[in-house]
Amino acid sequence: MIFIAPLAILGILLFTFIGGELVVHLWNWLLPPLFGWRQINFWQALGLLVLCRILFGGHGWHRSGRSNYRRRMAERCQNMTPEERQKFRDRFRQRMGERWGFGPSTGESKEQ
């Protein structure tokens, strides 16, 4: 155990350094010539890497919950009759339409 902790810390630092350098080189190679953006340094690249991880990568502990949700929804749909499935789809579409502003407006009826 005494040797594992320093190796783990060294591995994390090495992984962070390689990730930051990879982002620096990719950014400075692609974005300034394509879009005219400025070049970045290592610390900006590391910040960008952390920001992307927060926004898009999650933290790793939510994965099982997502698959659980999908499995439970699939089981529910299998146990529904075709009429119940259609009713569920219609309600879902109506709620999404209300939430995101598509579909018939409040003044229009469904018959039109």
Image (cartoon, grey):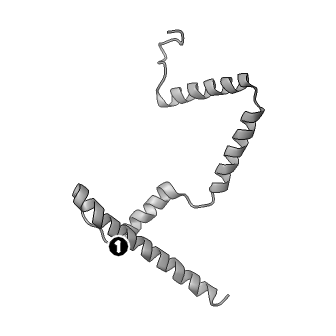
Task: Give coordinates of residue 111: x percent, y percent.
Answer: 53, 9
Residue at which label 1 appears: 42
User: The disc labelled 1 sits on which kind of residue?
Assistant: Phe
Image vertical order of residue 82 relative to residue 12, above or below = above
Residue 59 seen in render: yes
Label count reads: 1
Residue at 38% across, 73% down: 21
Q: Quadrant of residue 36?
A: bottom left
Q: Secondary structure at mark 1?
A: helix
Taking the spot 71% from the left edge, 45% from the top edge, the residue there is 71
Q: Nearer the viewer, residue 2 or 90?
A: 90
- Left or right? Give the position of 4 relative to 13: right
27 lies above or below 55? below
Image spot of residue 5 (x, y percent):
61, 84
Does residue 37 appear anywhere in the picture?
A: no
Residue 33: x and y, percent?
22, 60
Quadrant containing the N terminus is bottom right
